[in-house]
Amino acid sequence: MRLEVLRKLPKADLHCHLDGSIRTATILDLAREQGYSLPVDTVEELRPYVRVPKSCRSLKEFLECFDIFYPLLKNAPALERITYELLRDAAAENIRYIEVRFAPILQKDDGFPIPEVIEAVLRGIERGEQDFNIKARVIICLFRGTTLEDSMETVRYSSKYIKEGVCGIDVAGDESAYPLKDFLKPIDYALEEGLFVTVHAGEAGGPENVKQAVEAGAHRIGHGVALIKDPKLTEMIAKKQIPLEICITSNVQTQAVREYSEHPFLDLIEKGVVVTLNTDDRGISGIDLTYEYAKAVELGMGPATMKKVVYDGFKSAFASDEIINELIEAERENIEGLFNE
Ligand SMILES: [Zn+2]
């Protein structure tokens, strides 16, 4: 399929970090507005600091990109703006449903408490939905390395904003350094409150982390590429139809997978695992979802498989069956039409 057709294809993005999706030009604007000094003052000069080259093969290099602009995101107007811009960028490539995630614990500050962090993002979502052809929901990330109290508080606030658009929680951060057992209580709490749960697992860690996430009650797995190393577990995840949120380029850039050609997503699909394609950090990675679909095609994904992946993106949304059906029915004709071209 040509790039142009992949761009037109109605898509869902279920694994998308708000901070990692920031536009380079916006970082410059925010710095000017906030009187914050950056080492450079043009978009071209700033790009190498905040965007890894497509050839990046280093987790360290990847994570360093966040450092320079992070202090700029600890206020409401900045968060509202980058959320709105993300929806604009996503809608422009025909992403019709997006779940935007962020960790309020990293964004909050003295005088900028968690509820205000969440509300700022929700305002960006509301405006974006009004102005662009896209539906959006919010996933709140708990963060590995923070305290149990932090996580419980974050879940408590998340549950207060379900009606406003918070659909679930995630556990993000370094899975190789912080075990999931510290998050079982907050996950239970989230499930009781009716929130969906996803966990970053099997990205920097092994398949056992995927198993723990599923046992903890996760409805989806963030990345989960390590799953392929454990055939029995792969069979179990396939049987349970627990979707994986696959982000191909990010996996290669952070070295969760050594090379594009070694990415296991097609193997996993062949083994019956539900795979969705997502961006992860479109700003840092310098990609969009169209590019990720093109990569998947380049790696051997045929049209029938792609069609399934597209529908599985919508079907795996953290939403009621009714909303999922609505989303799919609204796009079915477009999707089918593009495959028949
Ligand atoms: Zn992620």
Image (cartoon, rainbow, N blue to C red):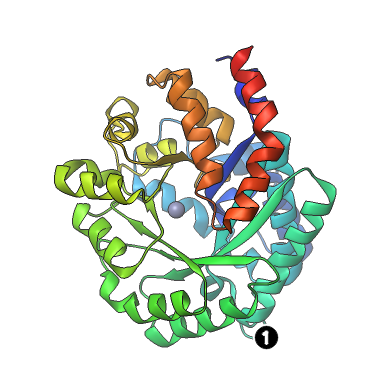
Between 282 and 200, the one lying in front of the other is 200
Residue at point 29%, 38% (across, down):
257
Label 1: which residue?
Answer: 111
Return the x and y of residue 221 as percentages of the image width and height.
37, 54
Residue at point 61%, 14% (across, down):
340
Between 271 and 210, the one lying in front of the other is 271
Amino acid type of the residue that numbered disc 1 sits on in the rendered structure: Gly
Q: Viewed as shown, does residue 41 lie left or right of 156?
A: right
Residue 228, by quadrant, is top left
Residue 158, by quadrant, is bottom right
Return the x and y of residue 133 as percentages of the image width and height.
77, 43
Neighbourhood count class around disc 1 (C-alpha, 10 Å): few under 14, some 14–19, many 20 upward: few
Whether residue 35 is visible to the viewer of this picture, yes or no, is: no
Between 334 and 93, the one lying in front of the other is 334
Q: Viewed as shown, does residue 320 lie left or right of 299?
A: right
Quarter of the rendering occupied by the C terminus: top right
Between 264 and 114, the one lying in front of the other is 264
Q: Is residue 131 above or below residue 170?
A: above
Residue at point 84%, 49% (across, down):
131
Q: Is residue 52 above or below residue 14?
A: above
